[in-house]
Amino acid sequence: MFVPCGTSEPDFTGFTLLMPAVSVGNVGQLAIDLIISTLNMCKVGYFYTDCLVPMVGNNPYATAEENSTELSINAEVYSLPSMNLMALQLRSIFIKYKSKLFCEKLISWMKSSKCARVIVLSSSHSYHCDDQQLRSIPFRYLLTPEMEKSVGETLQKLHWKEMEKSKSFPEIRDSGLCIRIPGGGITKVLYTESCSKGIQMAVVLKFVSEGDNIPDAFDLVRYLNDWLQIIKPQECSDPTTSVSQWKMPSSWRLLFGSGLPPALF
Amino acid sequence: MAATFFGEVVKVRSRAVTEDEEDEEDPWAPDNPEDREVRRELERKREVEVLQTQTNLSLEIPLLEQYPCSKFIMAVGNNAVAFLSSFVLNSETWEEIGSTKLWNEWCRTTDTTNLSPTDAFCVFYRLKSDPTVFLCQCSCYVAEDQQYQWLEKVFGSSPKRNLQITILTSRHVTDYKTPESSCNLPSPFLKALKTQSFQDAACCTLLEQPNIVHDLPAAVLSYCQVWKIPAILYLCYTDIMKLDLVTIEAFKPILGSKSLKGLVKNVSHGTEILKKLVTTNEIQSNIYT
């Protein structure tokens, strides 16, 4: 259920909703963090649900002492009206058996909020890639039939690759085809539900392995930016300068734990 | 699969996707009636109930909708519970009004009416002189799927804003992230987290990012943040998780806070009770005496 931070209900009509799937390496969540932090999006409400494990902490995007003590919870909605953008950030995992219920609640909110389209940032296990996928770029997309009509051509012009369908029963020759997103969490359920409910949704994912997934998140937002042009694309192709274009939130510090005891050395 | 620093190959569990979830989404997974029955039975067993002390019956409506409340003070975990027991519960006359009945892997207390001292529990008290002041002593583990149920049964889904909540709990110091080494931390120490509508000053510094809090305290604080209820959570980072005098004493600055101020009459008497409480527990847990 969406609960606004302020007293009035914000208007999301015609907005593009960006959201992560809680997936392998948390790449989608990290990418959404980068977008919120870079665009300095404003928190407008909470997606309060009993499907996610509770967690609280202080403002993950704090830039100064003054805004560092705003409490953050597990699912929050941010917006940037000047660009017709909104973002839903998920910060914890699903409670067992609750992921389907979450998708249902989310889809009904997508409909009632009147946002124009939804973009899901996700990831999939790279070790599941087949030979053909290994030889091409590590990004894939999926469009619901409603979305295909409006952006299908644009993505083809960008030479983006659609997620391949795989055989339902691998060893059988005439087996039907289906979409598999191993390690993608709710990605597939959200996508199939959105197809049947007529929601304009695009899934953009990267094949990754678990580890330090910060570079994957940068790759994913840069790739997404080719399409959405959220920030001005970099002039030179030097990858070291592009890192600074996206602002890492302050909460990404100490990703690998506290400092080491000096007595070790 | 991943290789560790020492070279062994271990199977890592994904941070994001559990194996069960994959199974759950498999359309070919057998969803036979027997499985469903087992799952439903388990759900029934894990249901959270609030029992009224007087009648020993399950409450039909949420606890705080049944009784008006202006101040709700709760302790989660043994050390916080012992702190409130010795300093607050012993200072005034409190009346026990209810307790929660819950079952999970870590909390198997089935008989909540006749608790033995070693049983885990979650009991609610009301101040005799001002019945709108509540105390909740929760020493049992409330599982992830039960935390929202707990909120619903205690606070209800239509929250009141004229209420102030204070939560006390402790965490292991290794959970605390700092740019320095955690060996140099002066544990135990206090940190606080507060909701936007909490206007009073905290008795200690606020928890810095990237530190976060999980479990029941997080569930309560999230609920308060979303429904704009003033609430504060005090966390005591300690290196001893069992009942420990030094850890409990670390909560002492909170006695001066606005929410606890009028409730504590005699601090030195409380300290004495606390010492007794800890030593009795020590003797019980020592197999060599």
Image (spheres, coloured by chain):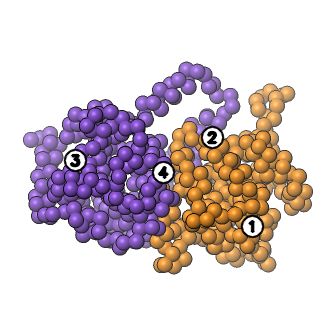
Chain colours: A orange, B purple
Looking at the picture, which amino acid does disc 3 mark? Glu
Q: Disc number at residue B95?
A: 3
Looking at the image, residue A83 lies above or below residue B86: below
The residue located at (70%, 45%) in the rendering is A190
Which image quadrant: the C terminus of chain A?
bottom left
Q: Distance between the residues labelled 3 and 2?
A: 43 Å
Disc 3 crowd rating (10 Å Cα; few below 14, some 14-19, many 20+) is some
Nearest to the eye among marks 2 and 1: give it. 1
Element on which disc 1 rests: loop
Q: Which of marks 3 and 4 is nearer the N terminus?
A: 3
Cα–Cα span, label 2 and label 1: 28 Å
SS category of the residue bearing label 3? strand
Q: Do labels 2 and 4 share a chain?
A: no
**Comes first in the chain, label 2 or label 1:** 1
Neighbourhood count class around disc 1 (C-alpha, 10 Å): few under 14, some 14–19, many 20 upward: some
Chain identity of mark 4: B
At 77% across and 56% down in the image, what residue appears?
A117
The residue singled out by tag 1 in the image is A84
Which circle, 1 or 3, is nearer the viewer? Answer: 3
Say whether mark 4 and mark 1 are on the same chain. Answer: no
Q: Mark 4 points at which residue?
A: B158
**In front here: B82 or A34?**
B82
Q: Residue A100 carries which label?
A: 2
Give the distance between the C-alpha atoms of the residues marked 2 and 4, in whole angstroms. 25 Å
Name the quadrant containing residue B73.
bottom left
Q: Identify the residue at image location x=22%, y=34%.
A: B114
Q: How much space separates mark 3 and mark 4, taking CA atoms?
A: 26 Å
**Co-location on one chain, circles 1 and 3:** no
Q: Tell me the kind of residue under disc 2.
A: Lys
Measured from the top left, where is residue A111 in percent x and y? 72, 51
Marks 3/2 same chain: no
